[in-house]
Image (cartoon, grey):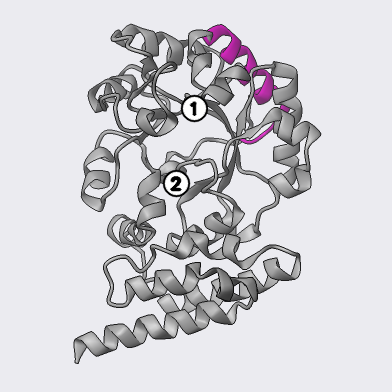
Amino acid sequence: MSSQPLQPASWRVCVAPMIDVTDRHCRYFHRLLHPRARLYTEMLSTGAVLHGNAARHLAFDEAEHPVALQLGGSEPGDLVRAARIGAEAGYDEINLNCGCPSDRVQRGAFGACLMASPSLVADCVRAMQDAVSVPVTVKHRLGLDYEDSYAFVRDFVGTLHEAGCRVFIVHARNAVLKGLSPKDNREIPPLRYDRAAQLKRDFPDSVFVLNGGIATVEQSRCYLETFDGVMLGRAAWHDPAVLTRLWLALEPDAREIDGDAVVTAMAAYAARRVAEGTPMRLVLRSMLDWSLGRPGARRWRQRLSDAQSLAANDPGLLLAAWEELKAASRAQEQ
């Protein structure tokens, strides 16, 4: 089993693993907005880690810690090898995806469909725990399709608990495997926070992080009375500033996040990535909605998404856009 003692506070605020969203550039930006949030990679299949460009897939900046690697897979041997590579790369946690409902993931026999095979998942978790010293955790749903029994998810968690898993990230919806897109699966199956809370009561020695539908400081405060942590998904992408609001509201020693410092750090980061051959558009795309609700927000988004300007790969674009945004704020105040 993982040798590091669990620190439940480490999962207090998390940013969900999101395919095509939480790449290393997004995570670096999110770290600047919340100094302690736990960040997750996009789901990486064991095949991508073992047979793809692992150095590219697993690269991250030291500033991202604590950062977790989420794996997709169902073959214990492959998961062990991938988990070891992730741990050796410096990740603070290995998370197994048992919640993604996409057809592509199902064809690979992993993701949410694994909830129908709790013994297999337990074997995978046990094998990874024996192989690495960092926590091995599981992200899962409440059930599959239109299964309405609490016993299903209780038994799933119970089987993993017996295998030694002590951190569960619960997306408080079912996963409908046929007939709904991944987007629909984030919106149509009803949220059942009460069932997720029952898991915390039934397994009190474990860490439970609530995921699904959480978008505000007020919601987070409410759910943190029951759960050890909250995990924000699309809210952190569509309104990144919510991470700073959470930092200031939930951390007693929090200090204001200086916008100038964030932009300066991102410009320097962009320069490093561009020097390595990364297009500026990939580095800056997570920042488009940081200005949401501010004067000049539309112009900011236009500047940072203009293909012709981005093609120059000049980090000065970000600095100029920031000065324009501040000028718009000053103009409104006058």
> What are the residue bounds of the magenta stretch?
118-134
- Alpha carbon distance from label 1 to label 2: 16 Å
- Name the residue tied to disc 1: 100
In the rendered image of this protein, does residue 228 appear above or below residue 121?
below
Location of residue 259 by image quarter: bottom left
Q: Crowding near pointer 2: few (<14 within 10 Å), some, many (20+)? A: many
Residue visible at 33% across and 27% down in the picture: 172
Q: Position of residue 26 (x, y in %)?
A: 53, 56
Q: Position of residue 40 (x, y in %)?
A: 53, 44
Which of label 1 and label 2 is nearer to you? Answer: 1
Say what secondary structure mark 1 lies in: loop
Q: Position of residue 285 (x, y in %)?
A: 51, 61
Location of residue 125 by image quarter: top right
Question: Which amino acid type is shown beneath numbered disc 1?
Answer: Cys
Location of residue 282 by image quarter: bottom right
Question: Which amino acid type is shown beneath numbered disc 2?
Answer: Val
